[in-house]
Amino acid sequence: APLLHAVALGKLAELPPATFKSESAVCVVLTSGGYPGTYPTGLPIEGIDRVPNDVVVIHAGTKRDEMGRLVTAGGRVLNVVGLGRDLAEARARAYAGADAITFEGKHARRDIGQFGVD
């Protein structure tokens, strides 16, 4: 995020050199039922607090409702990212995180990273 912010402001040269991890990453997108067509919104999302610590959840189509609950607000709801020593470990972590999250009509492809080469 700091890199993107610096680029947007034209201040990339002001940042220290970027460092990168040598790990593999897999991102599983959780979508609303019916996406990319018509889909409902306002459905409560649960389980983000049960996602393993080594998994990152990036919000895409979410919001807080009038009661403060996290709910769906788009077709692509959440991005669940697992990191690992290799693709198999990253994939297992991403799906463990994705499986911990629930909302009505949740859909996720089950083949992400399956055919990758590490």
Image (cartoon, rainbow, N blue to C red):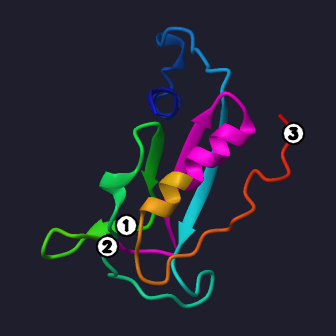
Above or below, comparing residue 98 to residue 21 in the picture:
below
Give, as a single range, the part of the protein colored magenta. Answer: 71-95
Find numbered disc 1 in the image and state the secondary structure of the residue it sits on.
strand
Give residue 32's position: percent from left, percent from top. Answer: 51, 78
Give residue 9's position: percent from left, percent from top. Answer: 45, 30
Q: Does residue 41 appear left or right of residue 32 in this picture?
A: left
Going by the numbered disc 1, the residue's amino acid type is Thr
> How many C-alpha atoms fall within 10 Å of the one at disc 3: few (<14), some, or many (≥20)?
few
Residue 44 found in image quarter: bottom left
Proximity of marks 3 and 1: CB atoms separated by less than 8 Å: no
Task: Count the labels in the image.
Answer: 3
Find numbered disc 3 in the image and state the secondary structure of the residue it sits on.
loop
What's the mark number on residue 117?
A: 3
Front label number (2 vs 3): 3
Going by the numbered disc 3, the residue's amino acid type is Val
Q: How many angstroms separate mark 3 from mark 1 (CA)?
A: 32 Å
